[in-house]
């Protein structure tokens, strides 16, 4: 049993190392590409713009639910005036970055893993190589770099809409004073909280996009099955491992930030 | 052989215990068409992929124009770097790009030409291959024959010195097969590239081949002119050729 555990741990460490080298190679390769701005804009559209609606919707409902749950908790202690503080800090420090990352992984990450897996199976990645185009720099690099600023931006949107959702439930439905709600929000949130949330978003962005692109790009090596099943397995594993890594890195970063 | 351009010595490629290529030796003359024949799954495409650097070798050497192949690939810094192109069996076209964008891709991303020069070259190439009308259509909107021609256009747009064709006529009707072979022969004459071709279209492919190499059991067991196939064929090759209808078609010609 110890041997099995050790072997699994070594495999995970080995894989993390491979993903790091893969990501670093992709970013380095990107800077040798031509038309870099156009590629970055396309990747930003894929990660940022396409994920905006789902992030906004989830942000709104998260805020609505938090307003409701926290109100009924706080009212027991007569502290409903602290609703703005509770909603804003929970969203900015924790739920915003985590849920945004999970949403982007579900939408853009799975699509990337599938697309790269199909391109691998269809020999399009080999074709790039025969054309002297670095496939990692061309296909992966722009996505990793776009993730660096898309994740914080989407997190900011999530936080703002979520805080507004808390206001809708707390003030408009449950009659907490609106002025008090917003005063508490502005009073309690510090730049350190916002910065901490953004640090998390950047780390989640790089980690999840690296895992998703790595899985798709290496479908031929990593999947247990060839063809369509292999692509489906790559996409599934990409989403599962990215989600696990979001929660694991969240714990680590929170430990350092607190 | 005079003027050997591509020289392969002792090339080995193993997948686990499966020794797919086990010491391949092959000399390909400059500006010639050499066709590799052999049973399915025997390693013909693996050989092409080793030459194209898509697979790492487990042994042996490949030389191009007297230089180790690593110094000769496109993208290497030397001004006399040899340009390679590869036409894939299933075309490997990008679904999200139009035919013209697919053809322009290697020039856009890996050449120093400006956009107007690229457009000019792409338009000319598409016109040569009868694809002008379809230049703005996506691969999914093209017929199998047209997709092959787009892939051929992409392989030739960089004026490569070596073109590797992996079963370029798979899935085409006899008329289209013939026209693809004609295009390869025509472009070879026009641009003077050296072609290495994997094909199962026996005997049609021999019409454009200067040399034929028979790959079997991981090595090249026959290498010579198509006309020498009958005279020099050992029994195993005869068996393979007769199964591929070669003997019958030759007999009917006689």
Image: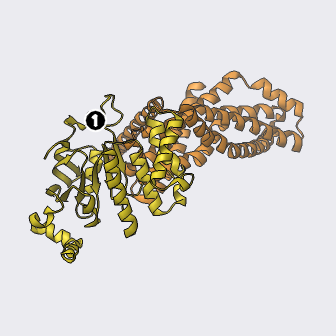
Please name whichever residue, B191 or A64, is drawn nearer the observer in this view of the structure. B191
Please name whichever residue, B75 or B115, is drawn nearer the observer in this view of the structure. B115
Q: Answer above or below: position of B133 versus B112.
A: below
Residue B251 is at least partly visible in this image: yes
Q: Residues within 10 Å of mark 1 (few under 14, many from 20)?
A: many
Residue A155 lies left or right of residue A76; in this view the side is: left
The percent coordinates of residue A190 (x first, y second) are 72, 23
Task: Name the colour assigned to chain B in the rendering.
Answer: yellow
Residue B54 is at least partly visible in this image: no
Residue at image location 57% in from the left, 52% down from the top: B136
Residue B88 lies left or right of residue A81; in this view the side is: left
The percent coordinates of residue A69 (x first, y second) are 76, 44
**Which chain does the orange colour mark?**
A
Which quarter of the figure is the C terminus of chain B placed in?
Answer: bottom left
The percent coordinates of residue B139 (x first, y second) are 51, 56
The picture quadrant where one finds residue B91 is bottom left
User: SS class of the residue under badge 1?
Assistant: loop
The picture quadrant where one finds residue B60 is top left
Residue at image location 37% in from the left, 53% down from the top: B88
Residue A229 lies left or right of residue B77; in this view the side is: right
Residue at image location 71% in from the left, 36% down from the top: A157
Q: Answer above or below: position of A29 versus B57.
A: above
Q: Answer above or below: position of A195 versus B236.
A: above
* Chain letter for mark 1: B
Q: Mark 1 sits on what residue? A: B72
Residue A63 lies left or right of residue B164; in this view the side is: right
Please name whichever residue, B205 or A197, is drawn nearer the observer in this view of the structure. B205
The percent coordinates of residue B205 (x first, y second) are 28, 62
């Amino acid at each position: 049993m110890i041997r099995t555990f050790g072997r699994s741990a070594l495999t995970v460490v080995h894989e993390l190392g491979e993903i790091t080298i893969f990501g670093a190679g992709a970013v380095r390769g990107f800077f040798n590409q031509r038309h870099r701005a156009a590629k970055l804009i396309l990747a930003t559209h894929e990660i940022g713009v396409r994920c905006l609606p789902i992030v906004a919707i989830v942000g709104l409902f998260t805020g609505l639910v938090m307003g409701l749950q926290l109100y009924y908790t706080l009212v027991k202690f007569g502290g409903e005036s602290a609703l703005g503080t509770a909603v804003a800090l929970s969203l900015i420090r924790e739920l915003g970055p985590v849920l945004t990352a999970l949403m982007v992984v579900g939408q853009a990450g799975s699509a990337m893993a599938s697309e790269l897996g199909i391109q691998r199976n269809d020999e399009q990645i080999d074709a790039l190589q025969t054309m002297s185009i670095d496939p990692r720099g061309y296909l992966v690099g722009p996505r990793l770099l776009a993730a660096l600023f898309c994740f914080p931006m989407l997190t900011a949107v999530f936080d703002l809409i979520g805080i507004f959702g808390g206001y809708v439930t707390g003030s408009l439905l449950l009659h907490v004073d609106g002025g008090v709600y917003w005063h508490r929000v502005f009073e309690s949130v510090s730049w350190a909280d916002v910065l901490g949330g953004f640090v998390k978003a950047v780390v989640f962005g790089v980690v999840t996009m690296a895992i998703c692109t790595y899985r798709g790009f290496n479908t031929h090596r990593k999947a247990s099955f060839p063809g369509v099943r292999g692509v489906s397995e790559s996409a599934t594993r990409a989403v599962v491992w990215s989600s696990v890594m979001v929660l694991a890195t969240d714990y680590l970063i929170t430990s350092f930030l607190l | 052989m005079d003027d050997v351009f591509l020289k392969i010595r002792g090339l080995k490629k193993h997948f686990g215990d499966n020794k797919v290529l086990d010491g391949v030796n092959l000399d390909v003359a400059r500006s010639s068409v050499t066709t590799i024949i052999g049973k399915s799954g025997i390693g013909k495409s693996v050989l092409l992929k080793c030459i194209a650097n898509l697979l790492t070798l487990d042994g042996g050497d490949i030389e191009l124009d007297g230089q180790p192949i690593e110094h000769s690939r496109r993208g290497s810094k030397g001004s006399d770097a040899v340009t390679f192109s590869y036409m894939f069996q299933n075309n490997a076209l990008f679904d999200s790009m139009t035919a013209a964008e697919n053809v322009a891709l290697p020039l856009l991303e890996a050449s120093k030409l400006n956009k107007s020069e690229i457009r000019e070259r792409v338009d000319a190439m598409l016109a040569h291959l009868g694809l002008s009308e379809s230049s703005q259509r996506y691969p999914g909107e093209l017929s199998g024959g047209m997709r092959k021609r787009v892939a051929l256009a992409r392989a030739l747009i960089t004026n490569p010195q070596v073109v590797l064709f992996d079963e370029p006529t798979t899935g085409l009707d006899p008329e289209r097969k013939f026209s693809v072979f004609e295009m390869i022969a025509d472009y070879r004459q026009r641009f003077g590239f050296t072609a290495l071709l994997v094909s199962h279209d026996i005997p049609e492919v021999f019409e454009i081949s200067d040399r034929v190499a028979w790959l079997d059991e991981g090595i090249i067991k026959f290498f010579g002119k198509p006309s020498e196939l009958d005279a020099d064929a050992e029994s195993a090759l005869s068996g393979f050729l007769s199964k591929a209808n070669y003997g019958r078609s030759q007999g009917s010609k006689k």
